[in-house]
Image (cartoon, rainbow, N blue to C red):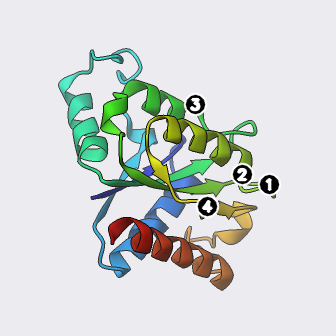
Amino acid sequence: MITIISGTNRKASNSLKVSKLYQGALKNKGLESQILDLAELPSDFITNMYGNHTEEVMQLITKNITKASQFVFVIPEYNGTYTGIVKLLIDGVSPSFFKNKKAILVGVASGRAGNIVGLEQFTTVLNHLHVEVLSNKVLLSQIDGLLNPSGEIIDTKTLETIDNQLNKMIDLHLN
């Protein structure tokens, strides 16, 4: 199972729109995936960390983290790096649940760098957790100009870049 993590707790975010695009692209390739929208984390996630999770939180972790073999992290740029809610997720889940899994990273930014700094910092965190990160990262710069009013990316070059990343993931990770 592939879990796509929409890396912000902002409701109706561009990251969620991109996550849905990735889910559709994976489905078109015959791969099953699910989206973990961090805007939907239970309100007690923060207060019940470090082995004190409620049953609801444990079910969420089991479904989206433990049972996943691969991750697609869609991470917006916040203050020049990745979001606090992504850090909270990583800190609130046992490192053993991430160990020996694989991930691809997608940066989302209003600016011109596509969250390259945040993705590099997050790669270091994932490597520390023994998660193999595909070197082919997608940087979606000036995201507002890439999304149409329906929240879809229609730029053919961007879609080709995403498709290439997913093909690399399939070639390197699933075979």
| Amino acid type at mark 2 | Ile
- The 10 Å Cα crowd at callout 2, few under 14, some 14 to 19, many 20 or more, is many
Which amino acid is tagged 1? Gly
Q: Which residue position is annotated with label 1?
A: 111
- Up/down of 167 relative to 73, above or below: below
Position of the C terminus by quadrant: bottom left
4 and 2 marks in contact (CB < 8 Å): yes
Indicate which disc residue 99 carries. none
Helix, strand or loop for disc 1:
loop
Q: Amino acid at mark 4?
A: Lys
Which circle's residue, 3 or 2, is located before the other in the chain?
3
- The mark that comes first in sequence, 4 or 3, is 3
Front: mark 2 or 1: 2
Point out which mark residue 116 bears.
2
Q: Earlier in the sequence, mark 1 or mark 3?
A: 3
Q: Nearer the viewer, residue 106 or 144?
A: 106
| Three-letter amino acid code at the position of disc 3 | Gly
